[in-house]
Amino acid sequence: FFTPSFAALLSHKKTITIDPTNTHPSNLSIMKIALAKTLLLSSILPTSLAEMVKNLRGGGGGRKLQGSSSCTVLMRADLSINPSRGLTDEGIECEMNAEDMDGYSGLSFPIQGNDAQMTRLKTLLESGDHASGESVLTGLKDAWIDKGKLFLPPGLEIALEKVSSRNNKRNLAIVTGKKPILVVKVTDINGLARTESAAQIGDDVFGTNGDPVNLKSQLFGCSMEKLDVTEGDQEDTSLTNGVPNGQGVAPGVMEVTIQLSLQSEGRGTVRNAVTTAVQNAIGESLPGRYQQVMYVLQGCYVECGWAAYAYINSWNSVYQGVYYKHTGVQVHELGHNFNLAHSGGLDGQTYTDHTCMMGNPLYSDDTGKMCYNPAKNWQIGWYSDRTLLLDPQVEPTKTVTLVGIADYLNEQSTDPVVIKVETRLANDFFVGFNRATGVNAQNDEGDDVVTVIQVDGNNGSGYSQSRLRAKLGFTGDITGSSYTISNFGGTGVSLTISVDSINLGTVPATATVNFQYGSPGTPSPTSSPTISPTKAPTQSPTKAPTQAPTESRTKSPTKSPSPTDSPTKSPTKAPTQAPTQSPTQAPTQSPTESPTKSSSPTKAPTKSPTQSPTQSPTSSPTKAPTVGPNCPSFSSKTCRQTSGC
């Protein structure tokens, strides 16, 4: 298909620039003339027709932008088939304005700039002030498209502008209500396409023919029935299977053929060709009436290593091979469209958090009952009425009972499902109970334990990489029962998150979590012993030594409850390192004739004041008897770890 006018074609002597994306009816006459001209001149031109198609994608010297001189910045996130290969899993592209693309919307190109420009662009996107799908790159008057990329002028100073001030019609990260989705089965010029029928593809995505676990069922479950995926546009009853222009071959599914080979073209070129073909078929722009559009390719042959990829906070996702039918991959890619970033695991890799679909997800058609982690759950907002914001600098000690998201709808509980631990920085922590039941029954890591997640930035409210920090519990797949964050929020004080109990026998199951910022306060001593002294001495000698040594043994027990500053001059000549093996020959004259019933003092005094006698006399007396440790419930983990309990 040819975009230059006939006069422009005549002026070309050896190279004809062609645009395979332009099939508008207004160009039909031009195409006919151009094709005739091409065939006439083919014997003298050094390039073949296929090579001229390639020239449009870069061989003809590039194409300068003609319209608005701006584009919408998009981040692209890849799901690598083998993350250990270390392939780049993110890219920055620009979605062009239709006026620069002969009336076609949704076409995008990777941005190619110098190091300073790309660093500046990435910094702006990571700052939180700008975001994928929400900001436009301006000043592109001298930019050009060549070899499938958008080249920035070397002297261009990177500037972004919020898209909301320019175009308020974009559907960004809609995560509640009806969600019309269009699925596109793609066939290339050589007939390469998935062997599944359109009806089977629709069943794998929407469950229209009984598929038990699919994109529609899982998003409905994870959202607690707040998000309802529909098969195309079901509101317009004039459409065939929810697709305009009679193009719906199954509910929510259409088919297109592109005039390119999957075996020779890169993914960006293929994607733009599909986007153009869809708009030609339905007679509408994309995304148009749909919130998300999914492309299903037969496979990948050029620029491979990915199972699928999607655009952040945008409308499109692309799948190759069998991966389109894997529920985990579907939920992962739609998560990117919802503005969710990858979830890294304990190993520090980008997406190895298997407690979350934004980690490397489940790869199976009918195994996919798993949702997102606490950080993503906080961001997506499905459970906003059952969250807790905790600022340890305000509330240093806090104990919270959690339930899993799968029990969110259980009317027997109003306990939170997500806790945000505020650091007063951008990299906050999030805590949740990873209950493996219901919609989360096929969770892949850390079943029925408490998970601690940290985000890299944006306070957990925007696009940001998250990282699994701990899996807390007493048995199973855990890192321990507590996790300490040193120098919490840059304060120099530690925060310890510990699990007191996990009870799977209740309905719903619960996890009790304790947060301790700094050291717990020391309890004040009681004004008197917890058990009043008897009139007669206890099994140990006197109630307490005097405050100072006496010249001789007292006639009765002293009233002071504290030890002496130094040993008495009698009965021993010097203080011993330990209590004497037996009592003195004669005790005090009252009240009893001998202080103990055995030949040596007992190993421990009464239940108060102290647990055991000191090894040697104390250097100074205490003002009041000491108290025993503050023991928690005997059934808790804390009890078993507290000295003396």
Image (tube, rainbow, N blue to C red):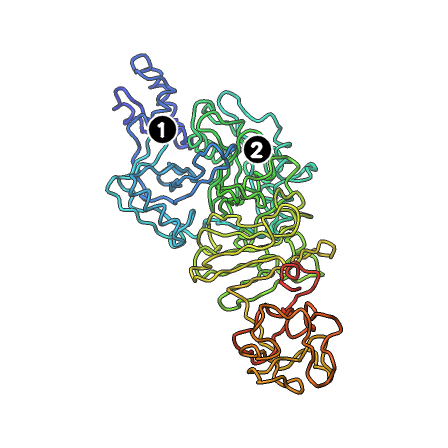
Give the class, few, some or many, for how many residues have Cα within 10 Å of label 2's Cα (few <14, many ≥20): many
Q: Give the farthest residue toward the top.
A: 43
| Location of residue 614 in the rendering, given as x and y in whole percent from the top left corner | 60, 69
In the displayed structure image, the side of residue 30 where residue 470 appears, left or right: right
As helix, strand or loop, the secondary structure at mark 1 comes to helix
Give the class, few, some or many, for how many residues have Cα within 10 Å of label 1's Cα (few <14, many ≥20): many
Q: Which mark is residue 57?
A: 1
Residue 241, visible in the rendered structure: no
Q: Quick check: 364 above or below 632?
A: above
Q: Give the farthest residue toward the left.
A: 155
For the residues labelled 2 and 1, the Cα–Cα distance comes to 28 Å
Q: Earlier in the sequence, mark 2 or mark 1?
A: 1
Residue at 41%, 37% in the rendered image? 107
Residue at 62%, 53% in the rendered image? 433
| Location of residue 114 in the rendering, given as x and y in whole percent from the top left corner | 29, 39
Tell me the quarter of the picture where residue 195 sits: top right
Judging by the rendered image, the residue that carries numbered circle 2 is 323
Q: Quick check: 77 above or below 549?
A: above
Residue mark closest to the camera, 2 vs 1: 2
Q: Quick check: 525 above or below 302?
A: below
The amino acid at mark 1 is Arg
Residue 545, visible in the rendered structure: yes
As helix, strand or loop, the secondary structure at mark 2 comes to helix
The amino acid at mark 2 is Tyr
Q: Nearer the viewer, residue 282 or 176?
A: 176
Q: Give the farthest residue toward the bottom.
A: 555
In the displayed structure image, the side of residue 558 where residue 343 appears, left or right: left
Q: Nearer the viewer, residue 382 or 452?
A: 452
